[in-house]
Amino acid sequence: MKWKQFFTPVSNITGDKARQLVAEKDPGEVVYLDVRQPKEYKISHIPGSKLIPIGELDRRLDELDPDVPTIVY
């Protein structure tokens, strides 16, 4: 059941730490997941980020690699 993945332990990081990861990591080392709406994503997003609106996340979890760290914003 995919919903159980929502209960996997997660870590929180600060905005500064997220910016540091963006600067330090190579593409593919980390996934930046934007859960806003497409209109918001179009206005501004982290280059290379993946858009999955929060309302669709439960149906689209299979698009994320559980072995790659994911930063959700």
Image: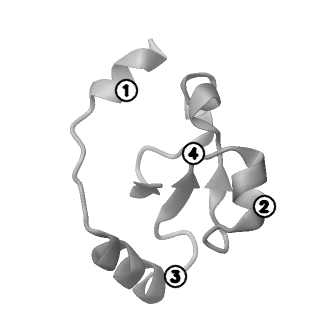
The answer to whether mark 3 and mark 1 are in CB contact below 8 A is no
Q: Tell me where residue 23 appears, x and y as whole percent.
A: 45, 88
Q: Earlier in the sequence, mark 4 or mark 1?
A: 1
Disc 3 designates what residue?
Answer: 26
Say if 13 sits above or below 5 in the image.
below
Q: Which picture quadrant has residue 14?
A: bottom left
Disc 2 designates what residue?
Answer: 42
Query: Would you say 16 lies left or right of 25 here?
Result: left
Alpha-carbon span between mark 4 and mark 3: 21 Å
Q: Earlier in the sequence, mark 3 or mark 1?
A: 1
Q: Which picture quadrant has residue 13?
A: bottom left
Element carrying mark 2:
helix
Say if 33 sits above or below 10 in the image.
below
Q: Earlier in the sequence, mark 2 or mark 3?
A: 3
Alpha-carbon span between mark 4 and mark 2: 12 Å
The label nearer to you, 4 versus 3, is 4
Element carrying mark 1:
helix
Alpha-carbon span between mark 4 and mark 1: 16 Å
The answer to whether mark 4 and mark 3 are in CB contact below 8 A is no
Q: Residue 5 bears which disc, if any?
A: 1
Q: Earlier in the sequence, mark 4 or mark 2?
A: 4
Alpha-carbon span between mark 2 and mark 3: 23 Å
